[in-house]
Amino acid sequence: MSSQTAPGNGKIKIAPSILSADLWQLGNQVDQVRQAGADWLHIDVMDGHFVPNLSFGPATVKSLKGRAQLPLDVHLMVQEPVKFIEAFAKAGADLLTVHIEAENAKEALLKIKELGVKTGLSIKPDTDPQAVEPFLPLLDLVLVMTVQPGFGGQGFLPGSPAQISTVWQLIHKSGRPVYVEVDGGINAQTAAQAAQAGADVFVAGNAIFAADNPAQALADIRQAAQRAAQI
Ligand code: DX5
Ligand code: ZN
C-alpha cells in the first residue's frame, strides 16, 4: 500500500503512549520523545468499568497541554463518554477518541465536533470493523485496537491486519481523509504489519518507554512503518 494512497495525509505518525511512562519522570520523558520526533502524545483514559483498569483524567491532559508541545491524542476507554467530553475538551485534548462499544458513541462524537476537537472512533479486537462505516462522515480517525484494551505491554493480536485492512478499505471508499490508528503491542515488527494493512498512526507504549533507548525505538518503529507502507 503506497503512503501516497493512505487515507490520512499520507505521512506516518508516531504517538507514544504515556501509560508506559515513568510518572516520576513524565516531563523529561515527554521532552525526550518529542525531541526524538514523536508526532502526537497518546493519553489513555480508563474508568475501571469499560476496561478493568484506571489511569488518567482531565487533570493529566491539562498539565501536559502546551508544555508537551505535541498534539494530545486522548483515548477514552470509558463506558459513558458523553459525561466526560466537555472536561477533556476544556483541558486541551486535540483529538478525542471514543469506543463504538461504549454508550451513546454517536452523541459523544457530535459533542466532540461541536466543541471543535478532532474526533476518533475505536473498535475492540472482536468488533466487526464494518460497524464504523455509518460514522465515517463524523470522523477524523478510526482507532483499531490491536490488543484487548486496558493494559500496556500485551502482544499484537494476529487478527489485527485483517481488521485494519477492512477499516482502510471503508475509509478509502468514503473518499474522506480519515487516519487509521493502531494501538497495542506495536513495535518495529508489528508496525510493519499494521502499515502494510493501511495504518498510518502508530501508538506505542512499552516499545518506546521501556526501551533502553526510547529515541532509537521510536525511529525504528517509524522506519519499519514507512518501509512497509511503500510496499
Ligand atoms: C491499552 C492502551 C494503549 C497502551 C498500549 O489499552 O490503549 O494505548 O498504552 O501499550 P503498548 O504499546 O505497551 O501495548
Ligand atoms: Zn490507547
Image (cartoon, rainbow, N blue to C red):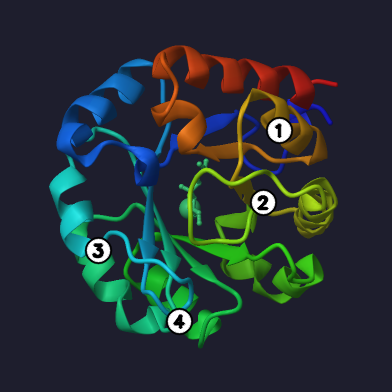
Work out whether residue 209 or residue 75 is closer to the camera in this orientation and state it: 209
Residue type indicated by callout 2: Thr
Distance from the alpha carbon under mark 2 to that under mark 3 = 23 Å
* Side of 60 where 230 appears, left or right: right
Are the residues flagged by discs 2 and 1 in contact, CB closer than 8 Å?
A: yes
Instruction: Using the image, determine if residue 45 lies above or below residue 159.
Output: below
Coordinates of residue 30 in the picture (x, y in percent): 27, 30
Residue ID for mark 2 = 146
Q: Secondary structure at mark 4?
A: loop
Measured Cα–Cα span from mark 4 to mark 1 = 29 Å
Lateral position of residue 101 relative to residue 33, left or right:
right
On the image, numbered disc 4 is attached to which residue? 79
Q: Is mark 2 within 8 Å of ligand 1?
A: yes
Secondary structure under tag 3 reads loop
Specify which label sits upstream in the sequence, 4 or 3: 3
CA distance separating discs 4 and 2:
19 Å
Report crowding for label 3: few under 14, some 14 to 19, many 20 or more residues within 10 A (C-alpha).
Answer: some
Q: Which residue is mark 1?
A: 190
Residue 77 appears in the figure: yes
- SS label for mark 2: loop
Q: Please, what is the three-letter code of the amino acid marked with disc 3?
A: Gly
Residue that mark 3 sits on = 57
